Amino acid sequence: MRDPLANASNMNSGAGTVVAEVFDERICSLGEGPLWHPQRKTLYWVDVLNNKVLARGPQGTQSWDMGEMPSAIGWVDHNRALIACESGLYLMDLNSGEKTLLCALEADMPSNRSNDGRADPWGGFWIGTMGMNGEPDQGSLYRWYKGELRRLKSGMTVPNGICFDRERCYGYYADSEKHTVYRVLLDTADGWPVGDPEVFVNLSVQQLIPDGAVMDGQGNMWSSLWDSARTQCFDPSGREIAALEAPVIRTTCPAFGGEDFTDMYVTSAAVGVEDRPGAEVANGVTLVYRNAVKGQPEPAVIV
């Protein structure tokens, strides 16, 4: 594998020259799903393989053991969050850590777990599933909305990169194993997909692996690329226009936060990689790029 950290430099289009800082030094085997809670001014994220939900904000650092693998987070109100775990979608009290089952997820497929997920602008929550070992075509994409869990797509391997262009009413998702990002038109009334998805970005030639993604305030997608030490920006036409380079190899998912949503947080993974000799930043930490690009707050999940 090429060294993704060699000769790395941030592009000057859109993001400017922005350098990553370490936001949280706790090492995640598989950090994922960062979410800035706009009311609590706190970043939440997960360490999938260690069953942890982590947080850092005005109350300092926090950690909760979920007893199973969590993978994605949505905020509900000041005191509650939706946590996607391997067995279902849960409501968690952010003060006590108590969780209650909201909706089971593939109870008939114990060899599957949840993966990437995100709230949509209508208050629904999209969540992907995958085989525990990334078995081909064993995963699916779902949407939970007003008490209904509906499968949107089957035959996926590693569903990822779920995000939404609110102005243009598009939903986006990736299948990391297939190096492809898709988009689908959404009904303006309720957010359900309309018609068939289309390929938005195909990274097969470059053998790049799209992981988690988020939309900025201009409708550009920022996708963290697994094993590539960067978060890549694609404009609404799918053209690469910027990148934020990282001092870690396995960048996994971005999120916007801070007082004016111009800070980008990026989780990373330590699993399967060794730190470079003399490296100042360890794989698995959570990064922040201050004043990177204008983002937007995540919508609340309606339960």
Image (cartoon, grey):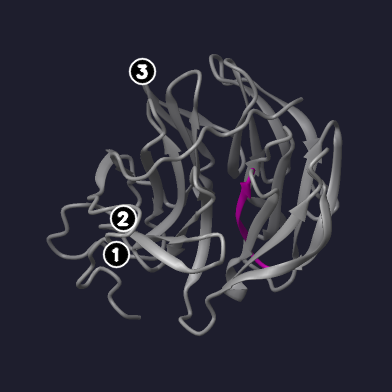
Q: Nearer the viewer, mark 3 or mark 2?
A: 3
Q: Where residue 177 appears, x then y in whole percent?
A: 60, 72
By secondary structure, the bulk of the magenta-drawn segment is best described as strand
What are the residue bounds of the magenta stretch? 157-166
User: Dot 3: few (<14), some (14–19), or many (≥20) neighbours within 10 Å?
Assistant: few
Q: Amino acid at mark 3?
A: Pro
Mark carried by residue 283: 2
Residue 160 falls inside the magenta stretch: yes
Q: Quadrant of residue 23?
A: top left
* Residue at screen point 68% across, 68% down: 157
The image quadrant of residue 5 is bottom left
Q: Looking at the picture, which amino acid does disc 2 mark?
A: Asn
Q: Is residue 162 magenta?
A: yes
Closer to the eye: label 1 or 3: 3
Left or right of 169? Residue 51 is left
In this rendering, does residue 114 appear at all?
Answer: yes
Q: Which residue is mark 3?
A: 58
Q: Earlier in the sequence, mark 1 or mark 3?
A: 3
How would you rate the neighbour count of disc 1 (Cα within 10 Å): few for under 14, some for 14-19, many for 20 or more? Answer: few
